Amino acid sequence: MLIRENYLSKIRGFYDSDLVKILVGIRRCGKSVILEQIIDEIKEKKVKEDHIIYINFEFIEFEDLKDYKKLNSYIKEKIIDKKIYYIFLDEVQNVDRFEDVVNSLRASVKNISIFITGSNSKMLSDELSTVLSGRYVLFNINPLSYKEYIELTKKDAYNLNNFWDYANWGGLPNRCEFNNEIDIKNYLYSVFDSIILRDIVKRLNLQDTILFDMILQYLIETTGREFSAENIMNYLEKEYKKISSETLYTYIDALCKALIIRKVYRYDVHGKGVLKTLNKYYMTDLGIARIKHNSDSFKNYILLENIVYNELISRNYDVYIGKTKNGEIDFIAIKDGIKNYIQVTYELSNDKVREREFNAFKPVTDNYAKYVISLDKENYSKDGIIHLNLIDFLMKDSC
C-alpha cells in the first residue's frame, strides 16, 4: 500500500483536535485509503478498537444509518466513557443532513475527534461552513502525483513511456491495477459515470445529459485556453443546442463542485490583484479528460501544463494565470507570500520557442524566482531564469 505521507503529514497534527477534519476529493482519488492509514496510526497509539468508529456509507451494512437521526443515535450509543473516540464518516454526503449530525456531535460530545470524507459539492457548500461555524479544517485530496504514481507502480520515473502513461491516463490509484488500454478506459468510464449519475445529474435534475456532456467535452478540448461563454454558446448553437448563459454557468459550476475541473483565475502582475474574469480551466485528472476527449490526445504542451498545475495545487500553492501588459505567464504560484513565476513548454531545443518562453518574464520587475519547465534534459537556464526538467520538478519537489 502506498503511504500518502504528503496528506498524512498535514492531517496528523489534528488527530486529537475537536475540529472536524474534512477530506474532499474526486471519487476514487484515495480518500478512503487515507482514512485507513489514519486509523492505523491511531491504533499505533494503543487506542482500543471500540474507540474507533468507522462508517462507510457506500457499504450496504450501513444503509440504515443514512437516516441522520439513526446515525446520530448509533454513534452516541457507542460513546460510553470519557476517553477520546475517533469517528470516521466515509462518503458522508450520502446522508441527508449529515452536517447537522456532525455539528450536533461536535457540540454535545466533548471527547470525540471527527473525520469525514466526500466527493461532491455538499462538502464544499456554504451551508456546511455555516453549520460548522468555522469549527473544521479542510484537506483537498488529489489523484496521485507523478511521484506517488512511481512509488506505487515501482516504475522508472525517467522512462518516458512511464511518464506518458501517467500523462495520458491520470493518477486515480486503482487504474494502476490495469495494464491494457481497454481495461483502463472501462475503469475510468465507470468512475466518470458514478460522478455524473450519482452527483451532478441527480442534484441538478438534468433532463439533457447530452448537452451537459458536450459542455464538458468543450471545456476539456479548450483546457488551458481563456474561457469564453460566448464561444461555447456559439459552438453549441452550431451543434443545434441552445443554452442560456445562466444554465451554462450552472453546469460549469456543477463540474467544478464535482471536482472534475478546476477554475484558475488571472493575477495582474502589475496591479498585483486577482482578476475574476478571463479565467481558465484545468482537469483534476487527465485520465477522465482522456476518455471524454473527442480526439486521440491533447496537445502535449497542454498535458504538461495541466500536470504542473495539479502538482502545484498538491504542494499547497495558490495558483493563478499571470496577466502582463502584452501577454501572460502560464502560472504564478504563491505560498507564504512568496511568488514563483512559471512557464511550461514541451521542449526548448528550438530558438524561437526559447525566446518566447524566456521573454514571457520580461514585464516582471520584481525579484521572485522565475522558472521554465520542459522535458529537455539539457539545462537552458539563463539571465537568472531557472530551467527545470519536468520529471526532476515532479520527483524532487523543486520550486
Image (cartoon, grey):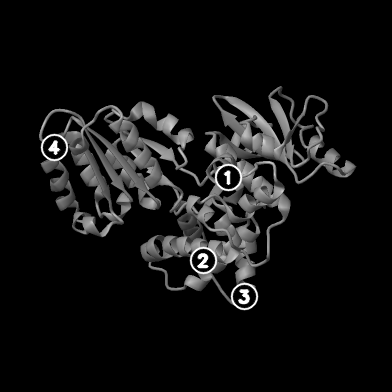
Relative vertical location of residue 66 with respect to residue 21 in this rendering, above or below: below
Residue type at the position of mark 4: Ile
Q: Cα distance, mark 3 to mark 2?
A: 28 Å
Residue type at the position of mark 3: Glu
Residue type at the position of mark 1: Val
Closest to the observer, 363 or 49 = 49
N-terminal of the pair, mark 3 or mark 4, is 4
The percent coordinates of residue 222 (x first, y second) are 65, 57
N-terminal of the pair, mark 1 or mark 4, is 4
Q: Residues within 10 Å of mark 4 (few under 14, many from 20)?
A: some
Closest to the observer, 368 or 19 = 19
Closest to the observer, 78 or 383 = 78
Tell us which disc is closer to us: 3 or 2. Answer: 2
Q: Residue at x 32, y 30 (%)?
A: 15
Whether residue 268 is visible, yes or no, is no
Tell us which disc is closer to us: 1 or 2. Answer: 2
Residue type at the position of mark 2: Asn
Residue under pointer 2: 186
